[in-house]
Image: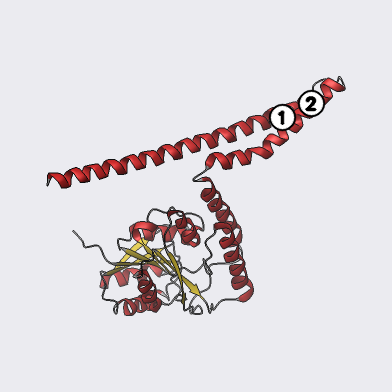
């Protein structure tokens, strides 16, 4: 049976053949001073160059290196999620594979984790990227994310982060969600810290990101806000959503009543039909909220009952001994 390492370093790679070897060497030099057991999880996101071959060569000479390979390109979040799933360390550190994150900063993350934090986020305070296409959109996005989620982090887009495995492995990731992990984890009440880290200009290849990410990030932000808002009080929020629909239904019913009762005209079927549809939608929304409330409350009650049962069993075991 293998021993669980103290640290897992997760690195998504996509067409980074020239960066793999120097990145590996930098990670080894940085981690060697910590005196911890570790593993390096390299996740190839369907690279079309020799990235996989370079990673395999490293794995053949060093048992610390593990490789996860995708058949095609699924995106950074999918690669990050796969690395998190396969990682076995107690603390997980994620970072980019383009040498812009500095492995020497891993020590700073671990020192902060030792203070009792569950998530430590890197902040690229001297970011070496283009102003118009990268820095300005990033600042706007970070401000917006902080306002919407209530988690004011300066640099959500920095991949250099450290997590306790027990926390991060329970968070589902898809689309561009890897940058929202602290916001998503905030519902569990973790202790989150942010520290300054170094950021270097890209040495090899070209950036895989552009302004096209804004659309995906905006949708993901909407999803996170919806989940965070609906989780604990679904009936309230679904009822609020039903109010505009119900308002349209009442207006349509009122118009129909005026046309039929006052003007004496035939029933306006399109308007009356829309009124019925809007009314049915409002009822469905409220019913969905009630169902969500029931599921949430039952799950909460069962969790508390299970906790009490477990405590009783533990107490009985201790008495028997």
Number of numbered callouts drawn: 2
Q: CA distance from mark 1 to mark 2?
A: 9 Å
321 to 34, vertically: above or below: above
The furthest residue to the left: 321
Question: What is the secondary structure assignment of the residue under circle 2?
Answer: helix
Q: Is residue 249 left or right of residue 133?
A: right
Q: Position of residue 266 (x, y in %)?
A: 82, 20
Q: Is residue 271 visible?
A: no
| Image disc number at residue 275 | 1
* Of residues 127 and 226, the one drawn nearer to the viewer in this rendering: 226
Q: Is residue 83 visible?
A: yes
Residue under label 2: 256
The furthest residue to the right: 263
Q: Position of residue 273 (x, y in %)?
A: 72, 27
Q: Is residue 97 left or right of residue 136?
A: left
CB atoms of marks 1 and 2 within 8 Å = yes
43 to 222, vertically: above or below: below
The residue shown at (39%, 63%) is 118
Question: What is the secondary structure assignment of the residue under circle 1?
Answer: helix
134 to 79, vertically: above or below: below
Q: Quadrant of the N terminus?
A: bottom left
Q: In the rendered view, how is the structure colored?
A: secondary structure
Q: Position of residue 152 (x, y in %)?
A: 54, 65
* Of residues 83 and 158, the one drawn nearer to the viewer in this rendering: 158
The residue shown at (42%, 59%) is 190
Q: Is residue 72 left or right of residue 209?
A: left
Task: Please tell me in which quadrant of the rendered image residue 150 appears.
Answer: bottom right
First-in-chain label (1 vs 2): 2
Badge 2: residue crowd in 10 Å (few <14, some 14–19, many ≥20): many
Q: Position of residue 80 (x, y in %)?
A: 42, 61
Badge 1: residue crowd in 10 Å (few <14, some 14–19, many ≥20): many
The residue shown at (39%, 58%) is 168
């Amino acid at each position: 049976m293998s021993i669980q390492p103290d640290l897992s370093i997760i690195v998504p790679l996509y067409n980074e053949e020239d960066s793999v070897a120097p990145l590996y060497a930098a990670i080894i030099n940085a981690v060697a001073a910590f005196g911890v057991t570790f593993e390096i999880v390299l996740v190839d996101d369907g690279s079309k160059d020799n990235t996989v071959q370079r990673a395999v060569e490293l794995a053949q000479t060093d048992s610390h290196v593990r490789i996860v390979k995708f058949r095609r390109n699924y995106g950074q979040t999918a690669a990050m999620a796969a690395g998190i799933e396969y990682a076995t360390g107690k603390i997980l550190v994620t970072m980019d594979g383009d040498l812009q994150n500095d492995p020497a900063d891993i020590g700073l993350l671990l020192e902060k984790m030792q203070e009792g934090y569950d998530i430590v986020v890197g902040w690229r305070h001297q970011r070496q990227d283009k102003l118009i296409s990268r820095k300005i959109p990033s600042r706007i996005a970070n401000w917006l994310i902080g306002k919407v989620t209530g988690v004011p982090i300066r640099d959500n887009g920095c991949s250099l982060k450290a997590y306790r495995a027990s926390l991060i492995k329970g968070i589902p990731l898809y689309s561009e969600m890897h940058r929202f992990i602290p916001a998503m984890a905030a519902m569990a009440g973790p202790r989150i810290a942010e520290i300054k880290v170094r950021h270097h200009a890209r040495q090899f290849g070209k950036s895989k990101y552009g302004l096209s990410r804004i659309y995906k990030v905006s949708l993901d932000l909407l999803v996170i806000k919806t989940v965070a808002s609906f989780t604990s009080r679904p009936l309230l929020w679904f009822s609020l959503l039903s109010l505009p629909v119900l308002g349209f239904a009442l207006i349509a019913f009122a118009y129909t009543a005026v046309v039929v009762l006052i003007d004496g005209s035939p029933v306006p079927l399109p308007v009356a039909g829309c009124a019925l549809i809007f009314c049915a939608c409002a009822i469905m929304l409220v019913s969905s909220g009630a169902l969500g409330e029931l599921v949430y409350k039952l799950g909460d009650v069962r969790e508390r009952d299970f906790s009490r049962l477990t405590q009783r069993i533990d107490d009985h075991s201790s008495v028997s001994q």
